[in-house]
Image (tube, grey):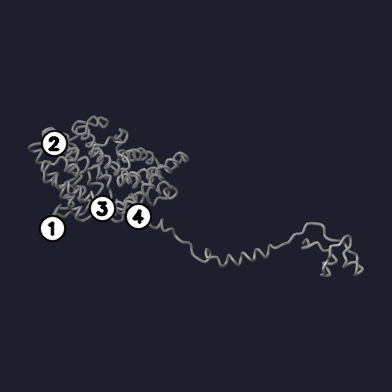
C-alpha cells in the first residue's frame, strides 16, 4: 500500500516525525542512520472500507427499506371504477357460469401488455362513474385520459404493425363505449364501430377466444341497428358485414334487425348509402322467424308476462329483452312494408308498442342495468311511431327518467334528439 505522507521510510518505520529535509532528514542524521529521503511518488489514501461501513449503517436505518411498498391509490380507484363499469354494462346471459364478454376481454393476457387498452378502459370507466355521479371534474379527467389513449393507440399501431388484432379490437370497442357515455363528436361512435367491424374479421382468423368475439359481434350489430334508426350515416363496409354462422345460431335477430334498420333508414331518413336489394319474401321470412322465436319463448315460460300486485312480471330479464327485440322487428316490418298505417296496421303497431313498454317498465322497475344498451332502439321506435299518444308519452318518460338518467348520456342524447326531430318533421307535414 502506498504511504499516507512523504516521510522517509526510516522515520515511518521508527514512527517518528520527519522534517522532509533533502537529501537526508535531521532525524536520520542525529541517529547516524542512512536516510532514503522523502517519498516522491503520489500518495494514495484508501478509505474504501470506512466509506462502505458508513453508508451500510445509513442504509439499514433507511425508511424506504423499513416500510413495505405502497400500492398506488390511483390504480386502486381506477380498478374500482373499471369493476363497476364492467358489471353494469354486461350480463351473465343464461347462467352464472358464463362470464360476460366484456369481463373476459378485460382479463385477456394480450391486453395486459397494451397500454392504450388499459388507459382507454380506465378513461371509460371513470367517465361512466363521473356521469352517474354528475362529477364534472372527473369527466374532464376522463376526457384527458381518453385523448391520451387515442394518441397512444395511434402510435402503437404505427410502431408495432404486428400487434394482436384482438388487442386493437378491444381498444376500439372500449373507445366506442366512451363515446356512448361522453360524446366528443357526432360521428366518433360510428367511426369506432366501423373500425371494430373491420378488425373483427381479421381477429376471427386467429380462431381463439370465440366467445369474446361472438359477444363483440352481437354488440356491434345491435348498436349499428340503433344508429341507423336514429338517422346516423354509417359507411357501407360497416353495415354490409354479416355475422358468423355460430353467432347467427346464438341470436338470429341481429342480422334481421340490421337489415330492417337499413331499409327503415332509406325510407324515413333518405340515407342512400345503405340501400340494398331486398330478396323476395324477406318480410314474410322475418315474420315467420319472429313467430317461431316467440313460440319457443312461450313454450319455456307458459305465462309471460304474469300479473303480480297489479304489475307485470317476467321469468327473467333475458325474456323481457328478447320480447322487446322481437316486437321491434315486427314494428319495423310494419313500418317499411306499408304506406298506409291505419286499420289493422295501426292496431298491430299499438299491440307491439304495448308489449315493448311492458318489458321496458319491468326492466326499469328491477333496475336491470345490462338492458340499457338493448332497450334504446325499441323505446325510440315506440316514441316515434306508436299510433297512441299515451304510448308515446310513456316511451318519452322511460327514455327520460330511466335511460336518460343512466351514465350512457351519449346514446340518450341521440335517441331524444331523433324523437324531437321526427315529431317536428311530422308536425310540419300537417
Q: Nearer the viewer, mark 2 or mark 1?
A: 2
Q: Position of residue 113 (x, y in %)?
A: 45, 49
Looking at marks 2 and 1 on the same chain, the residue that comes earlier in the sequence is marked by: 1
**Residue 204 falls in which quadrant of the image?**
top left
Answer yes or no: do the residues labelled 3 and 1 have beta carbons within 8 Å? no
Q: Nearer the viewer, mark 3 or mark 1?
A: 3
Marks 2 and 1, how far apart in space? Answer: 40 Å
Q: Position of residue 329 (x, y in %)?
A: 19, 41
Between residue 29 and residue 50, name the one nearer to us: 29
Residue 308: give its label. Answer: 1
214 sits to left or right of 10:
left
Name the residue beneath numbered marker 4.
81
Looking at marks 2 and 4 on the same chain, the residue that comes earlier in the sequence is marked by: 4
Point 88% across, 66% down: residue: 26
Looking at marks 3 and 1 on the same chain, the residue that comes earlier in the sequence is marked by: 1
Name the residue beneath numbered marker 3.
369
Q: Nearer the viewer, mark 2 or mark 4?
A: 2
Answer yes or no: do the residues labelled 4 and 3 have beta carbons within 8 Å? no
Marks 4 and 1, how far apart in space? Answer: 36 Å
Marks 2 and 4, how far apart in space? Answer: 44 Å
Marks 3 and 1, how far apart in space? Answer: 22 Å
Amino acid at each position: 500500500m502506498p504511504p499516507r505522507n512523504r516521510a522517509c521510510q526510516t522515520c515511518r518505520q521508527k514512527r517518528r516525525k520527519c522534517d522532509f529535509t533533502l537529501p537526508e532528514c535531521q532525524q536520520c542524521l542525529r541517529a547516524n542512520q542512512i536516510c532514503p529521503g522523502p517519498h516522491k511518488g503520489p500518495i494514495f489514501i484508501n478509505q474504501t472500507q470506512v466509506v462502505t461501513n458508513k453508508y451500510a449503517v445509513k442504509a439499514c436505518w433507511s425508511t424506504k427499506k423499513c416500510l413495505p411498498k405502497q400500492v398506488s391509490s390511483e390504480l386502486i380507484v381506477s380498478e374500482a371504477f373499471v369493476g363497476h363499469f364492467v358489471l353494469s354494462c354486461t350480463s351473465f346471459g343464461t347462467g352464472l357460469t358464463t362470464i360476460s364478454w366484456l369481463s373476459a376481454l378485460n382479463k385477456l393476457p394480450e391486453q395486459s401488455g397494451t397500454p392504450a387498452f388499459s388507459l382507454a378502459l380506465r378513461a371509460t370507466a371513470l367517465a361512466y362513474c363521473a356521469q352517474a355521479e354528475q362529477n364534472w371534474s372527473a369527466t374532464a379527467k376522463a376526457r384527458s385520459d381518453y385523448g391520451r389513449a387515442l394518441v397512444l393507440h395511434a402510435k402503437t399501431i404505427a410502431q408495432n404493425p404486428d400487434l394482436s388484432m384482438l388487442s386493437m379490437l378491444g381498444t376500439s370497442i372500449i373507445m366506442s363505449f366512451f363515446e356512448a357515455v361522453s360524446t366528443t363528436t357526432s360521428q366518433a361512435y360510428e367511426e369506432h364501430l366501423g373500425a371494430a367491424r373491420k378488425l373483427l374479421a381479421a381477429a376471427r382468423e386467429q380462431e381463439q377466444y370465440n366467445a369474446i368475439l361472438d359477444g363483440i359481434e352481437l354488440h356491434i350489430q345491435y348498436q349499428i341497428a340503433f344508429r341507423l334508426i336514429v338517422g346516423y350515416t354509417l359507411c357501407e363496409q360497416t353495415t354490409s358485414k354479416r355475422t358468423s354462422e355460430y353467432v347467427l345460431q346464438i341470436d338470429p335477430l341481429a342480422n334481421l334487425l340490421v337489415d330492417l334498420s337499413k331499409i327503415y333508414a332509406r325510407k324515413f331518413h333518405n340515407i342512400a348509402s345503405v340501400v340494398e336489394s331486398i330478396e323476395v319474401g324477406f318480410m314474410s321470412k322475418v315474420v315467420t322467424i319472429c313467430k317461431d322465436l316467440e313460440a319457443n319463448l312461450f313454450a319455456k315460460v307458459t305465462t309471460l308476462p304474469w300479473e303480480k300486485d297489479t304489475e307485470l312480471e317476467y321469468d327473467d330479464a333475458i325474456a323481457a329483452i328478447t320480447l322487446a327485440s322481437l316486437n321491434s322487428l315486427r314494428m319495423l316490418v310494419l313500418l317499411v312494408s306499408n304506406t298506409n298505417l291505419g286499420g289493422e296496421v295501426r292496431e298491430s303497431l299499438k299491440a307491439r308498442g304495448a308489449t315493448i313498454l311492458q318489458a321496458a317498465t319491468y326492466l326499469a322497475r328491477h333496475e336491470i342495468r345490462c338492458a340499457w344498451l338493448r332497450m334504446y332502439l325499441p323505446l325510440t321506435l315506440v316514441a316515434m311511431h306508436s299510433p297512441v299518444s299515451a304510448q308515446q308519452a310513456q316511451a318519452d318518460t322511460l327514455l327520460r327518467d330511466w335511460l336518460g338518467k343512466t351514465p350512457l348520456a351519449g346514446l340518450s342524447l341521440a335517441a331524444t334528439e331523433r324523437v324531437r326531430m321526427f315529431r317536428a318533421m311530422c308536425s310540419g307535414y300537417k
